[in-house]
């Protein structure tokens, strides 16, 4: 099944839309995955920052509880210290088991764990010393432990600041990456939607143009059908007219010829002119009807080419006899041939119409008694005919229109004619893939050269 252009365009447009949607859907999961990963990283960073904050707060509470217990001896302060130490241990474990740290952060966390462990040991040493010995010497030792604990705290604070700064930087990077991914996703979706609208608009445009073209084709088909119907009506009309006119014309021609034969020996030749005029007018009328019917059949597509084998030289001689018999001005018709002219495969009726019209025109536009030449050139694949007269010629400005029906040259003056002869010649040549060429120096006559492709069976030269 062959698809029309509109169907191909619509199918291509739908395919393009589906492809765009597929590309958008293909890129969307990847973009969504990146968004989820960025969101997880952001959440992880917030969790790490929270753990660091909780660790530092627990460390401060543990220090405060230790001091309060040592200075006041209250058990509540000891419990507060122990709870804070437990909280510090939990937060350190969370930080150590976190999976999103890079290598530098892991080193910092390990260092933090080392310092925190040292400080926790100091806390425990301080408590054990307090519970075992409360002398002045032990108090001095407590002060030393406190000083060393403060140094560790400062190191831990610096390390916590580094970890927080690194996490904050990672947080900013994750947020920026998320923002970029969101913009990228939005641009993809906008581009996909825009391209879908463009493709859909193009498809609608093509569809509308196709509808207009289809409407024009329908109008052309209707016009063609109407023209064909008109041509058929014209053909039937002219066929009827031809039939109705030819019968009385044949009667007129036969009657005038019979009268001329009867009266030829009884009256003066000058008195027979009227009968000759009747015969000439009847023949002209008959030829005019034949030309009109031929053109009408050609326009209706009813004029057919039916080639058959015919003796081309005999055909030309018979044609000249027919033309000479209807030549009241007694032009001298001369025939010659070149090449091996025997039997050729051509349509006899169409060839008769071509040459008879060219010869009749040559007679019509040449002075009485002048010579008209018909030359035949025979080849293996083509025959050529030359019709040369000594008439008024054809003006250069008339050449383009000379084969148009009813067109007559501007130099014909008062010479009668219908302007159909050369149009009939052109139509008959088209049916046989023939060509015609004109050579006509003004005031030097006109030469028509007719070329017809054909098969031939060679013969002797005439």
Image (spheres, rainbow, N blue to C red):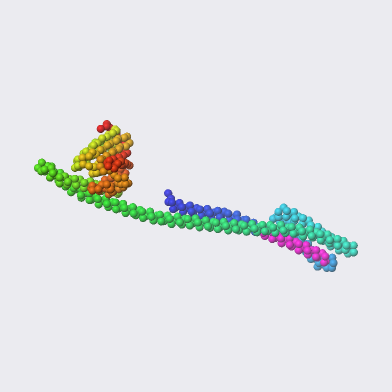
Instruction: Please name the residue shown 27% across and 34% down the image.
Output: 337
- Residue nearer the viewer, 436 or 195: 436
Quadrant including the C terminus? top left
Is 41 covered by the magenta stretch?
A: yes
Q: Is residue 323 left or right of residue 197?
A: left
**Residue 192 visible from this viewpoint:** yes
Q: Residue furthest front?
A: 443
Q: Residue furthest right?
A: 136
Q: Residue furthest top?
A: 460
Position of residue 458 measured from the top left corner of the image (x, y, whole percent): 29, 33
Does residue 410 lie above or below 150 as drawn?
above
Instruction: Please name the residue shown 66% across and 57% down the image.
Output: 173
Position of residue 249 measured from the top left corner of the image (x, y, whole percent): 18, 47
Q: Residue furthest left?
A: 266
- Residue nearer the viewer, 404 or 135: 404
Quarter of the image where one finds residue 62: bottom right
Position of residue 296 measured from the top left corner of the image (x, y, whole percent): 27, 49
- Which stretch did the figure color magenta? 40-69
Is 285 covered by the magenta stretch?
A: no
Q: Is residue 75 left or right of residue 358?
A: right
Q: Is residue 249 left or right of residue 52?
A: left
**Residue 348 visible from this viewpoint:** no
């Amino acid at each position: 099944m062959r698809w029309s252009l509109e169907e191909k365009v619509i199918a291509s447009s739908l395919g393009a839309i589906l492809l765009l949607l597929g590309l958008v859907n293909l890129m969307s999961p990847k973009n969504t995955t990146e968004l989820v990963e960025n969101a997880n990283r952001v959440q992880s960073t917030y969790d790490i920052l929270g753990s660091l904050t909780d660790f530092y707060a627990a460390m401060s509470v543990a220090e405060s509880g230790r001091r309060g217990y040592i200075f006041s001896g209250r058990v509540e302060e000891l419990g507060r210290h122990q709870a804070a130490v437990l909280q510090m241990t939990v937060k350190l474990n969370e930080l150590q088991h976190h999976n999103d740290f890079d290598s530098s952060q892991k080193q910092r966390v390990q260092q933090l764990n080392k310092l925190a462990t040292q400080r926790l040991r100091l806390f425990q040493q301080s408590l054990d010393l307090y519970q075992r010995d409360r002398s002045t010497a032990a108090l001095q030792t407590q002060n030393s432990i406190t000083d060393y604990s403060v140094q560790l705290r400062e190191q831990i604070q610096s390390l916590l600041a580094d970890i927080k700064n690194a996490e904050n930087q990672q947080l900013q990077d994750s947020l920026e990456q998320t923002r970029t991914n969101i913009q990228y996703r939005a641009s993809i979706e906008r581009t996909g939607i825009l391209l879908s609208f463009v493709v859909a608009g193009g498809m609608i445009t093509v569809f509308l143009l196709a509808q207009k073209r289809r409407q024009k084709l329908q109008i052309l088909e209707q016009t063609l059908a109407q023209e064909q119907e008109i041509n058929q009506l014209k053909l039937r009309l002219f066929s009827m007219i031809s039939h109705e006119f030819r019968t009385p014309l044949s009667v007129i021609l036969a009657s005038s010829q019979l009268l001329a034969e009867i009266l030829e020996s009884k009256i003066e030749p000058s008195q027979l002119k009227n009968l000759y005029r009747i015969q000439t007018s009847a023949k002209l009328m008959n030829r005019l009807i034949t030309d009109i019917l031929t053109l009408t059949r050609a326009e209706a597509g009813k004029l057919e080419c039916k080639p058959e084998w015919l003796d081309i030289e005999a055909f030309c001689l018979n044609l000249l006899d027919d033309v000479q018999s209807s030549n009241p001005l007694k032009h001298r018709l001369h025939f010659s041939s070149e090449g091996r002219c025997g039997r050729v495969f051509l349509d006899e009726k169409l060839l008769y119409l071509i040459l008879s019209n060219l010869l009749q025109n040559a007679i019509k536009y040449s002075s009485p008694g002048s010579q008209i030449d018909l030359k035949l050139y025979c080849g293996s694949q083509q025959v050529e005919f030359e019709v040369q007269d000594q008439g008024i010629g054809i003006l250069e400005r008339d050449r383009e229109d000379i084969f148009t029906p009813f067109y007559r040259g501007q130099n014909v003056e008062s010479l009668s004619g219908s302007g159909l002869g050369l149009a009939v010649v052109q139509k008959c040549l088209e049916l046989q893939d023939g060509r015609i060429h004109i050579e006509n120096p003004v005031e030097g006559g006109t030469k028509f050269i007719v070329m017809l492709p054909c098969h031939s069976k060679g013969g002797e030269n005439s």
